[in-house]
Amino acid sequence: MSTDDTSNVALELHDITKRFGSVVALENVSLQIKRGRIKALLGENGAGKTTLMRVAFGMIQPDAGWISVNGVRTKLPSPSRAIAAGIGMVHQQFSLIPAMTVVENVALGGTGTFSREEIASTLSDISSRTGLVLDPFAKVAHLSNADRQKLEIIRALAHKASVLILDEPTAVLAPGDVTELFKQLKSFAHHGGAVVLITHKLSDAREHADDVTVLRRGRLVLNEEMSATTDESLAAAMLGSSRDFSTPQRKSIPSVSTTVVSVRSVVLADNPRRSPVSLEIGRGEIVGIAALDGAATSLLRAIANRVKPLSGTIELPERIGFVPENRKDEALIADFSLAENLALADASSRSGVMDWNAIADETTEVIRAFDVRTPGNEVSPAKLSGGNQQRFVLGRELRGRPALLVLENPTQGLDLNAAHFVHEQLGEARDNGAAVVFYSSDLDELADLSDRVLVVSRAGVISVPPDRDNIGRALLGTDGS
Amino acid sequence: MSAVESFLEGAIRTATPLAFAAIGETVVERCGVINIGLEGAIIAGAFGGFVAAGSGSIWLGFLGSAAAGVLVAAVFAIITIRVRADQIITGTAISLFCLGLTAMLYQQLYGATGAALSIPTMATTEIPVLASIPVVGRALFAQPSITYVLYLIIPLVWWWMYHTHAGLAVRATGEDPRAVIAAGIPARRIQILCVLFGGAMGGIAGGVLVIAQAGSFAEGMSAGRGFIAIAIVVLGRWHPLGVAAAALIFGAASALQYFFQALGWPVPYQLFLALPYVLTLCGLAGIAGRAVAPASLGRWPDQT
Amino acid sequence: MGAELALVTDALVRATPLMIAGLAVALAFRGGVFNIGAEGQLLVGAAAATTVSLAGHAFFGRGVVVIALAAAAVAGGCWAAIAAELRRRFRVLEIISTIMLNFIAIYLVSFLVRGPLQEPTHIYPQTESLPAAARLPILVPGSRLHLGFALGVAAAVLLSWVFRKTAIGFRIRATGASPLAAFTAGRIDVSRTSFLVFLFSGALAGIAGGIEVTGVTFALYENLSPGYGYTAIAVALIAGLNPLGIIASGIFFGALETGASALQREFAVPSSIASVVEAALIIGVLTLTAIRNRRVPGRAS
C-alpha cells in the first residue's frame, strides 16, 4: 500500500500550528491517519505529539490549519464533536473517574435516563467481539493500570470510534500486558480501524507500527512507512543535532573529595512502587538529572529538603539553595518588593528586628552582580521579565554561599543571554566548591552543563555519560534497559 | 400530643428549612463547587418570600423566595465560575452583604413606619389517613404543605443523581472536571446550573422560615442555617438520603429542648440553641467518620 | 459639654471596639487566616473580663483592670484556638467554624447572665455593675471617652511596627501573601505561623471585648455587641489591612454609626443606613480582593 493512496485516509490534519504564549508548540504539521494501519507518532519530551493529538481530539483549537474526517473538512471544537466523528482517545493520565464504576465511566456523555443494565449489555457485546473483558460494576479505583487502559479502549469502542489515538499506552504496563494490548490494536486495525500510537519507546514502535511520523520541537521531520526506516535513522530524527549556543568550556573533571549529599534507599510518596533510590553528590560537581514527565520532581525536592521521604535516609548540608521551576508561585511573592523577596530566603532563621537598610543594600548588590534589569529595589518581581526574575532568584539563593544548590529547569523560558548567564553562574558555583544538582527536560543543557548525568525512571537511577545520545537513548529505552 | 410526638413534630419542622438548603447544597457540592453564600440565599429568600407573600398568595411568596435565592446564586456563579475568583471569599462576602442588605431593606420598607406587617402564613395540612399513624403520623404528615414538597424533592434528587446521564455528569464533574471535559461534557455549564438550583433551594428554605414558621421577617433570621446546611452535607456524605437523615438529626437536636421542657428537666435552654452549631463543628471535623468529598470540591480545573 | 464635642467623643468611644477588633481581623487576614469570629472572641473576652473584675476587685483594687484585660485576651485566644485546631487538624474551613463559634458565644453569654453571673436580685438578664475601681479611667472629663481608645491606638502602632520591622511580622506577611512561596523559598513553618496568628487574633478581639466592658458598659448582658466583630471586618478591609489605617477607618465607622443613631433620633432616618454602607463596602472590597487572589491565602498546606 503506497503512502499516496488517499482513499483509506480516516483522519487528516493539515498545516496545524499552535502557540502557547510565546512558545510554538506545533508549526505547520500535517498528518495522515489511514484505516487498517497503525501509525507511530514519535518524538522527545515536548516535541508536540500530545498537543497534535489533542487538536485531533478537539481538546485544543489550532491557531492555523484544518482537519478533515474521511475526506470531509470538519471542525472539532470539543471532544464531544470528535467522539461523534468517530475519534476516540486513550489518554496518558487516564481520563477516568476512579470513584465511579466501569459502567458509569463508559456512560459519561450520554443523555436521558441511564440504565446500568443497558450499558452492561453493550459492554458484553464489545467483550465478545474483541475479547476485552472487564467487570462492569467494578470501581475504577480498584482496577489495575492495564485494566484501566482496557476500559478507555472499551469506552472509545462503545462510542463507535473508528480512529483510536493512544497516548503513551505502554508506559504503565507490564510486558505481558503490552503484548495483549498490541494484539487488540492489530485486531482493531484489521477490522478497518485506524490507530495512532504516541510513544517514546522506539522498540515498541518498530515492532508494531506500520507507519511512523517523527516530530521534533513542533515540526514534522520524518513521515514514512516503518519498513523504510532503521533504529538509527529514527533516533537521529528524534534527537537531532546539538543546539547553537555553547556553554563555557568545562574545567577539568574535578575529583570528588567530600560527599555533600547522601541519599540511601529512599522511597518517595509520589512513586512508592519504584525501587529505593541511592545516590551521592560531592563537592565541586554539577550533576544533571534526566527523567520523563516529572518522574524526578519528588526526588529533587527531597534533596532540596522540601519533601520528606517515606523511608530511607538523606544527609544534607545546612545551607541549601533552591531554584524551583515555578518561579512565579514558589520562589517569589508578587505582593512583596524585591528587597522583601531577598529577605525571604532566610526568613525562617531571622529573629528580632529586620534591618531593612542592610537588606536594601544587599538587594542592590545582588541586582548589580547578577545584572538584573529592574527599575529598583522596591518593585514587585512580577514587573520583571522571566530572565531577570531568574537572575534575581539565582542571586538570592547563591548569596548565602550554599554548600548545595538545587535547580529545576533553570533556563526554561529564558532568553539566550539569561540562559548563558545562568550556566556561567552554575559553573562558577561549582568551581568554588558547591555541589550543584539540576533537573532539565532539555537534553542539550544536560549534556553541556553536567559533569555527570543521572537518569531517573521507573526502574531506578542509572548513571550515564553526559552526552546527548547516551542520555536520549537511556530515556527512550533504546539502550537495552 | 405526648412529649415524644411533639418532639418528633418539632424535629421535622426544624429540619425542613435545613433540608431544603442542604439538598440544594448537595447538588452544588457534588459538581465541585462550595457555596458559602448559601446563608445569603436563605436570608434573601426569607426577605423575598416576605415581600412576595405580601401580595396575599402563599405560593407566590414561595416563588419570590426561590427567585431571590436564584438571584443571589447567579451573582455567586458569575463571580466564581465566569470570573474564576475564589469561591470561599466570594461566598462569605455575599452572605455578609445579603444579611446587611435585607436588614436595611426591611427597616426601610417596613420598619420606619413601625407597622408590624402581617402576611398570610401557611397552616398545617393534615394528610387524612397517614396522619393517624401512631407516634410518627402527626410528626410526618401534619406539617405545612411545603414540607410535603420536600418529601417529593428528596427522592427525586436521589433518583435524578443516580439514574440519569445528567446526574452522572454532575457527579463526574465534581470528581474530575478534566476527565468530564475530555468526555465531551460542558463542565462549566453544569456547575452554573447546579449553583442556581442550590440558590433556589436555599431561597425556599428562607421562605419556609418566614411563611411557614415565623409569619414575619426579622433581621438575621437565617441564624447561620446556611453554614449548618454545609455541615449537614458533610455529615450526610454528599448523598441525598444521607443529607436528609442528617438534617433530621439536626432538627431533632434543636427540638430536644421542647422534649426536655415537656419532661420538666431543668437544662438551660441556651444549650439547645447552641447545639446545632456545636453539631456543625463536629460534623465538619468529620467526627462521624471520615467522609469522602467529591474529589474536585472547591478547586478549579486548569483548562487547556 | 458642648453637643459637638459630645458627638466627637461618642464617635471615638464607638470606634474603640471597632478599631481593636479590626486590628484582630487584620492580623488574621494578613497571616492568611479568615477569622470571621471576632464577634464571638470579643464576647467571651467580655465575659472573662466581667467575671475577673467582679471576683477580684476587692482583692486587687485598681489593678484588677489589668488582670481583667489579660483574662479577656486569654479567653479570646482560647475561643479562637478551637477553630484554629479544627483548621489545623481536620482542615475545617475557619470561615464556617468561627461563625459557628460566634453563635455559640452568644448563647454562652445569655446563659451566664441569666444564670451563674446574674445580678443579685435575679430580675434582669445582666451581671452586677462593675465598681468604680474596676473601670477604665476617663480620658476627657465629662465625656465617656475612656483609656481604651488610647490603648487601641497604641495597639495599632505596635502592630504596625511588628509588621514592618520584625522578623515574625515578616514571616506572618509572607505566610498570608503566599504560603507556597513562604514554605518553598522561605522554609517558613506555615502551619505553625498561621496557628499562632489565629490565637493572637482571637486574643486581640478578646481584649476589645474586655475594654468595652471595663470602659463603656460596666456589665455583661445580652446584645452587648451590635455586631462589632462583623463590622470590624469592613473596618479592616477598608483600611487595606494596614494597622495605622485601621485607626482612621475605625473612627470613620464609629462616626458613621454614631451619626446614624443621631440621625435616627432627630430625623427618623433608619439607622441601618450605616449597615448597608458597611455591607456594600464589604462586598466591594472582598470581591476585588477575591478577583485579585484567585486562591485562598493560607489554605494550601
Image (spheres, coloured by chain):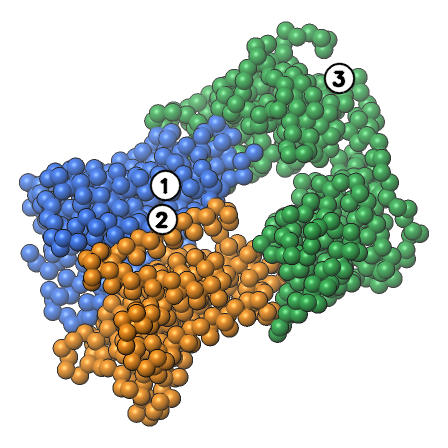
Chain colours: A green, B blue, C orange
SS type, badge 2? helix
Q: Spatial distance from mark 3 to mark 2, Cα to Cα?
A: 61 Å
Viewer-proximal residue, B208 or C28? Answer: C28
Above or below for A127 versus A424: above
Instruction: Look at 37% across and 30% down and name the residue there.
Output: B166
| Residue identifier under label 1 | B75
| Quadrant position of the N terminus of chain C in the picture | bottom left
State whether discs 1 and 2 lie on one chain.
Answer: yes
Check disc 1 and give the amino acid type. Val
Q: Spatial distance from mark 3 to mark 1, Cα to Cα?
A: 56 Å
Check disc 3 and give the amino acid type. Glu
Q: Residues within 10 Å of mark 2 (few under 14, many from 20)?
A: many
Provide the chain ID for the residue under circle 3: A
Say if mark 1 contacts mark 2, CB within 8 Å.
yes
Q: Residues within 10 Å of mark 3 (few under 14, many from 20)?
A: some
Q: Which numbered disc, 3 or 2, marks the residue closer to the eye?
A: 2
| Residue identifier under label 2 | B94
Question: Toward which corner of the image does residue C183 lie, by quadrant?
Answer: bottom right
Above or below for B289 versus A143: below
| Residue identifier under label 3 | A224
SS type, badge 3? strand
